[in-house]
Image (spheres, rainbow, N blue to C red):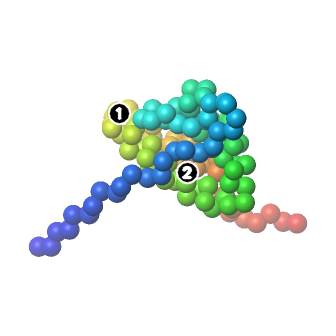
């Protein structure tokens, strides 16, 4: 019998975006709760979403990849905090990727 043990994935990207401008507190997440450092809302908060869209305006695919990596890290943190009552995968997807601008419509709109 052949058994293979896959290695545990390493840590994902460090949540250091959106970047802070000026002396204001950056809208980055506080781990492991994934609340916004500036306003306490679930991260990404509305301000962080706008700043991320502006920062990644020319590379929306990179924004989606960055958010997918953070989704993985958030799911790991939430599972370790409370494995039974954490957010559902659908809620986590909507929170991290559901708002992402890098999505194509199922049907191309008619001109």
Q: How many marks?
A: 2
Image quadrant containing the N terminus: bottom left
Which residue is at the front of the view, 98 or 78? 78
| Drawn side of residue 97 relative to residue 110, left or right | left
Q: Which residue is mark 2?
A: 67
Residue at 55% x, 58% y is 65
Residue located at (84% from left, 66% from top): 110
User: At 72% from the left edge and 65% from the top edge, which residue is drawn?
Assistant: 107
- Quadrant for the C terminus in the image: bottom right
Numbered mark located on residue 81 in the image: 1
Q: Residue 45 falls in which quadrant of the image?
A: top right
Q: Residues within 10 Å of mark 2 (few under 14, many from 20)?
A: many
Q: Position of residue 68 (x, y in %)?
A: 52, 53
Q: Residue furthest front?
A: 23
- Residue plotted at (48% across, 52% down): 13
Q: Nearer the viewer, residue 50 or 107?
A: 50
* SS at mark 1 in the image: helix
Rendered position, 97 above or below 46: below
Seen in the image, is 9 located left or right of residue 47?
Answer: left
């Amino acid at each position: 019998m052949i058994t293979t043990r896959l290695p545990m994935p390493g840590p994902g990207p460090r949540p250091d975006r959106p970047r802070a401008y000026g002396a204001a507190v950056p809208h980055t997440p506080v781990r492991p709760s994934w609340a916004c450092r500036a306003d306490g809302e679930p991260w990404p908060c509305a301000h962080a979403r706008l700043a991320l869209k502006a920062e990644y305006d020319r590379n929306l695919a990179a924004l989606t990849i960055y958010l997918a990596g953070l989704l993985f890290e958030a799911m790991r943190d939430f599972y370790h905090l409370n494995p039974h009552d954490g957010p559902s995968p659908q809620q986590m997807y909507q929170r991290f990727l559901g708002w992402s601008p890098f999505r194509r419509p199922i049907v191309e709109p008619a001109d």
